[in-house]
Image (cartoon, helix red, strand yellow):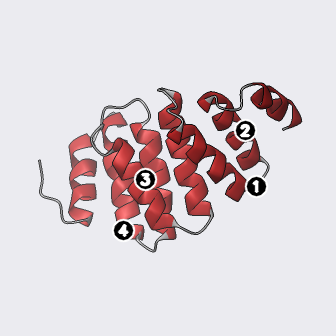
Amino acid sequence: MRRIDALAAERPDDPEALAEAGGARDSAGLESWAEQLYVRALDAGLAEPYRSQVTIQLASTIRNLGRPEESIALLDAHFGDQPEHELAAAASAFRALALTSAGRQVEAVAELLITLAPTLPRYRRSVRAYGRDLVGLPEE
């Protein structure tokens, strides 16, 4: 963490440096501090692909801090209209964790089934349909 902090100190307003410092705090279990740095990085205009990565990291941290609904909202706001985003499946995994933390286990299972379905060699349509049915979504 000291090395990252030293590098970040050379670029105190750099969004990527703030994000790296946040990640170091997160890895060290200093989630409240990590949250502040992640938010600063995003507010400072962190660009892609780091913006999406930090959004997932922030959502995970927020969930770990006991705010799963806020975590879900953050992921929905960033990835909700980007189902083809390269990190969409990762975002779904963290969204499912937040759903579970919020006591919404059936929605979490549905999220995972719907995300998993396209990767299956067989039974894609069935798994997707069952996932959608769990949460009352019509078949496509």
Task: Specify the quadrant of the image occupied by residue 38.
Answer: top right
Task: Specify the quadrant of the image occupied by residue 88.
Answer: top left
**Residue 54 on image: x %, y %:** 55, 39
Mark 4 element type: helix
Give the CA separation, mark 1 to mark 3: 20 Å
Name the residue beneath numbered marker 4: 106
Q: Earlier in the sequence, mark 4 or mark 3?
A: 3
Mark 3 element type: helix
- Classed neighbour count for the residue bearing mark 1: other residues with Cα under 10 Å, few (<14), some (14–19), many (≥20): some
Quarter that holds the N terminus: top right
Name the residue beneath numbered marker 3: 74
Name the residue beneath numbered marker 2: 21
**Residue 80 on image: x %, y %:** 31, 46
- Residue 104 visible in the picture: yes
Farthest bottom residue in view? 103
Q: Amino acid at mark 2?
A: Ala
Q: Earlier in the sequence, mark 4 or mark 2?
A: 2
Name the residue beneath numbered marker 1: 30
Give the CA separation, mark 3 to mark 2: 21 Å
Q: Amino acid at mark 4?
A: Val
